[in-house]
Amino acid sequence: MRPGIRLAVDVGSVRVGIARSDPTGTLAVPECTLDARKDWIVELARLVGEYEPLEVIVGLPVSLDGKEHAAAQRVRDVVQRMIVACPNTPIRLVDERLTTTSAHAQLREAGVSTRKGRGVVDQAAAVIMLQNALDAERATDPPGTLANGPG
């Protein structure tokens, strides 16, 4: 397991959820929710400067049959902007299938109403995605593929 903080990004059309790990790469925690209708990549670059993460993990919305559609292409386009804004930070794409569904279910189980949960569901999805990535790396290797480098 590589030590170091990771940031995770769950890109939505209205909100962008951000999560981060502890420095040991053991636990994912919510960081913030950004407004996707604004230039949120500037705020992400600020967070990257503050935390100096080992990498930024971005959820790639893949359909249940494993195919990429329009939403995945939008994320890939956003990742290109992230690479420009954070040129020295590796950006890793990981499959985010069902993370938002799981986040909604966890919030419901915690008694959070759908209305109140809207503002944090993307954050919760980013936490689930990051924790899955941390667990996968601990078991084998880092998941997904680097968007700005080999592997």
Image: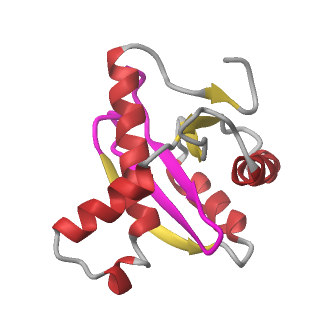
- Stretch in magenta: 1-27
Count of numbered circles on the image: 0
Check the image and name the residue furthest to the left.
110
**Residue located at (24% from left, 78% from top):** 112
Check the image and name the residue furthest to the bottom.
115
Query: Where does the N terminus fall, quadrant-wise?
Result: top left
**Residue located at (72% from left, 33% from top):** 147
The image's colour scheme reads secondary structure
The answer to if 62 sits in the magenta stretch is no
Check the image and name the residue furthest to the front.
65
Report the front residue among 112 and 65. 65
Report the front residue among 73 and 52. 73
82 on left or right of 31 = right
**Residue located at (56% from left, 46% from top):** 59
Percent x, y for residue 46?
63, 62
**Position of 144 relative to 103 (above/below):** above
Report the front residue among 111 and 83. 111
Percent x, y for residue 55?
57, 37
